[in-house]
Image (cartoon, rainbow, N blue to C red):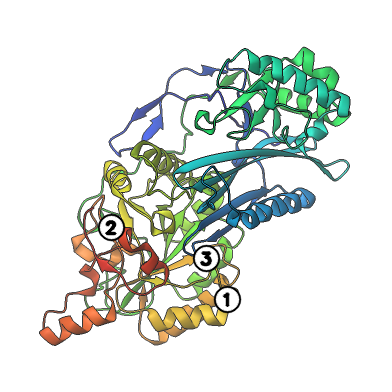
Amino acid sequence: MEVMSRWLSSGGVAVIIAVTTGCGISLPSHAPPTTLPAQPTTINFVDPASVPGLAVRVSSDDSAPRHVFTAYPVPPAAAPLGERLRRATEAAVRGLGRPGGKGGGAATELNVGWQITAASGGVYGVRLRTGTLTGSAWRNSLATYWYDARSGRVHDSAGLLKDGAALARLAALTRARLGTLGPPVRPAAVRADRDLFDSLNFNPRGDLVAEFDDGRVAPARMGRIAVAVPRQDATPLLSEFGLRVMTVVDSATPPTLPASPPPEFTPSPEVTGPDRAGYGGGGLSGGAGRAGGRADCSVTKCVALTFDDGPGPRTRALLAALAEHHALATFFTLGAGGEARPDLLRAIAAAGHLIANHTWTHRDLAPMDVNRISDELNRTQIAIGVATGRVPRLMRAPYGSTGGGTVAAARALNLAIVGWDVDAGDARDAGPAAVARRTVARVRPGSIVLLHEQGPATVPALREILARLTAKGYAFVTVPELYGSRGMDPGRVYGGAEPPLRRARHRAAGTEPDPSQVATAPGSAASALRDAAGSHPGRDI
């Protein structure tokens, strides 16, 4: 089945010319088509939205002191490939606690992302990028896995080669090409080692591209190092399957790159007044006190349920559970997942829920500079906008970890920052009853509840949470509805209800604020938020 209808590239990166719109994001221009990039280490990537039935498996762990996020795709009818990718990501998680780096310390963040390098002609290719943070040093490692649908076998990258002699010849060719780069590249580090050549792909000309992990053949600060072995030199080295892969990639590469945005994409209009930081969604959401179909949270007990890390295989089940209780929610979506499954984003929007930005890769933003943060947010804005026709006005930092760079980037993109005051714990707890009990016990009027789209306990727990909070008289609203006519300001952090002790003191003093007007910040107290132990006064950082 031919599914490679759209093409992306990276490495010697192909860049689509962009212009800045009034919405604060870069959108593709209407310039003429851009010719294919000439950089020899450019790699073909398949637009994941062109792979029907693609599932994306996500797992996260925000347990202090480490941050873990893994994601990998499972193409349809390619279960062995999905199993191989699962084992690879689980091995990366197990290795997180091992000492590494020059300082001998253990990594504190692990982030696994993916791209599809082929999806036609009975061949699937998936490139995993595994990043780790040790101290202040970030390192990426790369591995590309190839699936042969005819045989049902998964091959590592060295499986594209004929035999050990071909691997040795590839190593020699690679050393020669690295030698032309000069210091500090280390050609002598290249050996005929399958583990070293674990990410082999093809560029648009059919040259064999070998990528190396950070620090393997050059200082890690240099980032991605790759060489392209010309097609005429690489062809004799390839196995029968390797030749098929080269042919599939070559046949799927278009002569030009599209430079126009999809016809369905139109930036959303500027919004002022009560909805200026979000699109509250239509429909009823339980409880009383609604004016014009919206809850008035100054007179109604309101709670905002939020779902991170989607969309994914459980998204439609969550939507069904919410619909049963006429409940609205806010979905903090990952750009990479949204790009892969725009149909799920459209389903969320069609049900009246609010879609918000959860970055592209789920990296911890706090150690990143403002330019990288802006890229994480901007790419996600575009992916959501292309899928739904509207760009978000809210974002949530992965792990609730914010800093000055996050605030600056969010303000520039017209995004309010949303934390939480109740952590359902569904990312770590597989027991639905415990998740529901914990959540219901901690919810207060004005609470923002953190849930995860792909938590194993989330769907059954959600049904219980909705039933019990409905019985308590709560209305289920989107995050902007909590803040009513006051709205939400770009660059400010909002974290839900006040801790009970502070609320009791306000009550005793006769100065209790409207819960819908209380903003609390996750930035400097992310660990407290993760423990759902309360939050701190909202502020600009």
Residue 460, labelled with which disc? 1
- Tell me which amino acid carries mark 1: Pro
Q: Position of residue 343 (x, y in %)?
A: 55, 50
Q: Is residue 209 visible to the viewer in this orientation of the structure?
A: no
| Earlier residue among tags 3 and 2 | 3
- Mark 2 Cα-neighbour bin, 10 Å: few <14, some 14–19, many ≥20: many
Which callout, 1 or 3, points to the residue nearer the camera? Answer: 1
What's the CA distance linking mark 3 and mark 2? 27 Å
- Tell me which amino acid carries mark 3: Leu
Numbered label tally = 3
| Earlier residue among tags 1 and 3 | 3
Q: Position of residue 332 (x, y in %)?
A: 44, 56
Disc 3 designates what residue? 319
Q: Are marks 2 and 1 in contact (CB under 8 Å)?
A: no
Disc 2 designates what residue? 493
Q: Are marks 3 and 2 in contact (CB under 8 Å)?
A: no
- Mark 3 Cα-neighbour bin, 10 Å: few <14, some 14–19, many ≥20: some
Q: Quadrant of the N terminus?
A: top right
Nearest the camera: 8 or 3? 8
Query: Does residue 216 lie above or below 342 as drawn?
Result: above
What's the CA distance linking mark 1 and mark 3? 12 Å
Residue sitting at 73 percent across and 32 percent down? 197
Residue sitting at 27 percent across and 41 percent down? 412
Q: Position of residue 342 (x, y in %)?
A: 53, 47
Location of residue 192 by image quarter: top right
Q: Residue 105 vs residue 147: left or right?
A: left
Q: Residue 418 vs residue 183: left or right?
A: left
Q: Position of residue 213 (x, y in %)?
A: 62, 35
Query: Does residue 398 lie above or below 160 as drawn?
Result: below
